[in-house]
Amino acid sequence: MISSNIVQNVDLEKLQGFRSFLQDNPDKGKLVLEARALYEGQVGRSTVHIGPYELDGNRVDRETRHYTIPFGAWREVEEAIGVEGPTDRYEPVEMALAATAACVINSISFNTARLGIDVEDLEITVRSHVDPRVLFAVKGPESHGPCLGTIEYDVKVKGDISDEELETIKQLCEHSPVYGLLVEPIPLKANVVRE
């Protein structure tokens, strides 16, 4: 028998318990995430490893959480810039857009389930125009904004959704942490060392 507390495959009591824990314990529930990129010895190509993370100071390192992602560009772009043996790879800006789309779905789905909004399906499309002049140092880092332009996203919601619920869903998009990475001036600190 399926519990009535299970909505979209999440136990609403546990979800609310987790939210209450976060509200009552402002210094708990924090994550430390990391990704490690290794240069492959070929211009524009790296292999990124994702795996270990920390939750409240406890390191979690499960073998089943180790992911390897080959980064580079598209065959046509690699050919245009002279990369030998051009191939298709995950492109970093596309992955940032993909992460944004996935995280916006997380924000919407967790919260609509909790709020009782009947979402049957979601589709998020994120896009941006990219001018590679900063990457190739034709322009300086101060030109990131104009070179990346406006990031646009479309949210398609299927279900019995009122106009008010649709407005709530629009607001929930902004609760995505990756959305926050893109819109907020998050400090970046570079530590460059000789090994």
Image (spheres, helix red, strand yellow):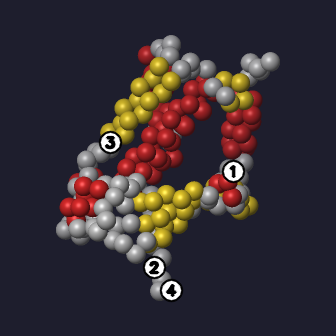
Give percent across and percent down for residue 64: 67, 54
Element assignment for label 4: loop
Q: What amino acid type should be assigned to the residue bearing mark 4? A: Glu
Element assignment for label 3: strand
Q: Is residue 35 left or right of residue 125?
A: right
Residue 163, relative to residue 65: is it above or below? above
Q: Is residue 145 left or right of residue 56?
A: left
Residue 62, relative to residue 109: is it above or below? below
State if disc 3 and disc 2 touch (CB < 8 Å): no
State if disc 2 and disc 4 touch (CB < 8 Å): no
Q: Is residue 184 visible?
A: no
Q: Residues within 10 Å of mark 4 (few under 14, many from 20)?
A: few
Residue at 68%, 42% in the rendered image: 23
Q: What amino acid type should be assigned to the residue bearing mark 3? A: Arg
Give percent across and percent down for residue 71: 41, 60
State if disc 3 and disc 1 touch (CB < 8 Å): no
What mark, if any, has residue 127 been given in the picture?
3
Count of labels in the image: 4
Give whichever of 123, 150 is nearer the camera: 123
Q: Is residue 44 visible?
A: yes
Mark sitting earlier along the chain (2/3): 3
| Residue 12, image quadrant | top right
State if disc 4 and disc 1 touch (CB < 8 Å): no
Residue on which disc 2 sits? 192
